[in-house]
Image (spheres, grey):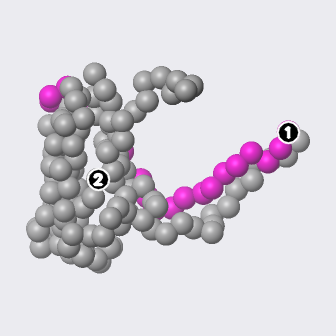
């Protein structure tokens, strides 16, 4: 069965369906409801045997690159990409088809936001490569 990575971004994707403020401006009960929904999605996927992994990430990041054979790794906290490039978290699922992965992503997109309204957030659906691409 194919595996898919369902990526959540900090304000990533095409234009927002409905604008909403950053989570640090939400009422505490809205944040709690949001994370309770996402936890429930994980439980449903675990119950169906489709969940491989789920993680949430902080917006803090460090860029790292190889510094050379006799040098330490080079790191920087900036320049930072636009917030749309930051991954907020993911679900890794093992499903029967791409259609099922899209169905799960649409459900995740219905997560509650401020006031309980669905965020209609874009979810980035990526198939995990099962082997290296063939040379053409």
Dot 2 surroundings within 10 Å: few (below 14), some, or many (20 or more)?
Answer: many
Query: Does the magenta portion include 53?
Result: yes
Q: Quadrant of residue 34?
A: bottom left
Image quarter (top left, top right, bottom left or bottom right) of the C terminus: top right
Instruction: Give the residues in magenta.
Output: 47-69
Residue depicted at 31% across the width and 26% down the height: 2
Earlier-in-chain disc, 2 versus 1 = 1
Left or right placement of residue 22 versus residue 36 in this view: right
Q: Quadrant of residue 15?
A: bottom left
Image quarter (top left, top right, bottom left or bottom right) of the N terminus: top left
Q: Is residue 136 above or below residue 78?
A: above
Residue depicted at 28% across the width and 28% down the height: 94
Left or right placement of residue 44 versus residue 80 in this view: left
Disc marking residue 7: none
Residue depicted at 48% across the width and 23% down the height: 131
Q: Is residue 45 above or below residue 32?
A: above
Whether label 2 touches label 1, CB < 8 Å: no
Left or right placement of residue 119 versus residue 74 in this view: left
Disc marking residue 123: 2
- Check the image and name the residue furthest to the left: 116
Q: Check disc 1 and report its element: helix, strand or loop.
A: loop
Counting from the top left corner in percent of width and height, residue 112 is at: 15, 62
Residue depicted at 42% across the width and 65% down the height: 84
Say which residue label 1 marks.
Answer: 69
For residue 28, say whether it is visible. no
């Amino acid at each position: 069965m194919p595996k898919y990575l369902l990526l959540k971004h900090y304000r990533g994707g095409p234009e927002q369906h409905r604008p909403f403020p950053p989570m640090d401006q939400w009422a505490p009960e809205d944040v709690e409801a949001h994370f309770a929904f996402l936890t429930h999605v994980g439980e449903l996927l675990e119950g169906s045997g489709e969940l491989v992994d789920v993680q949430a990430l902080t917006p803090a990041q460090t860029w790292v690159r190889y510094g050379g054979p006799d040098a330490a790794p080079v790191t920087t906290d900036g320049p930072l990409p636009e917030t749309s490039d930051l991954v907020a978290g993911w679900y890794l699922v093992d499903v029967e088809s791409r259609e099922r992965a899209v169905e799960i992503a649409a459900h995740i997109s219905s997560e509650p936001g401020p006031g309980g309204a669905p965020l209609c957030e874009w979810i980035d659906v990526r198939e995990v490569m099962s082997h290296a691409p063939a040379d053409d």
